[in-house]
Amino acid sequence: MKRKDYQIITNNPLVKENYDRVIFVDGGFQDVLIKTRDLVHSGYKLISHPLGASIRMFFSPYRSILITDKADKLDMEHVEIIENSIVSYKKQMDHRKPDEANSKDYACIDGELLKSALEEHERLSI
């Protein structure tokens, strides 16, 4: 049985079309980080890391982040992770723009990374 104890924060239209439990952000990568930060500050916890494992993924116009359902208390470690992720993203993108020319490829990659994160979450939750 698949667990449904998570939310997906995304700006990726492919994710919006193919998953439920989606909070869709009409904006860019940074907007997804900010929405995630707001939710973490209200008690949600991160399941997947807000930033991709590759520096190249910073240039993606899309990002999908897994968070738990709302918890009873604020987790300061998760607050620190999301806050530091926003700072790192801004620093990295100060003089660069998202790679819109390859946005379809980035949407697919983001979808695959999300699928992998969901599979790992399911496996670890059993």
Image (cartoon, helix red, strand yellow):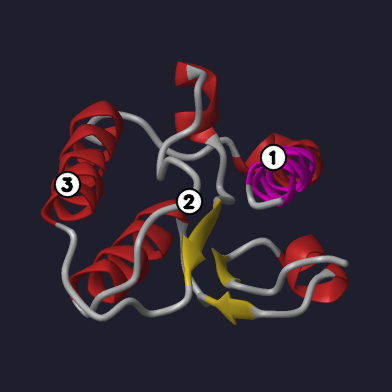
Over which residues does the magenta segment extend?
Answer: 112-124
Helix, strand or loop for disc 3: helix
Q: Earlier in the sequence, mark 2 or mark 1?
A: 2
Is the Cβ of the residue at disc 2 closer than 8 Å to that at disc 3?
Answer: no
> What amino acid does circle 2 point to?
Ile
Q: Nearer the viewer, residue 49 or 33?
A: 49
Could you tell me how far apart the alpha carbons at marks 2 and 3 are, in whole angstroms? 12 Å
- Give the side of residue 71 with respect to residue 65, left or right: left
Residue 19: % across, % down? 80, 71
Residue topped by disc 3: 77
Residue topped by disc 1: 120
Residue 78: % across, % down? 24, 51
Is 95 covered by the magenta stretch? no
Is 121 covered by the magenta stretch? yes
Q: Residues within 10 Å of mark 3 (few under 14, many from 20)?
A: few
In which quadrant of the rendered image does the N terminus lie? Answer: bottom right
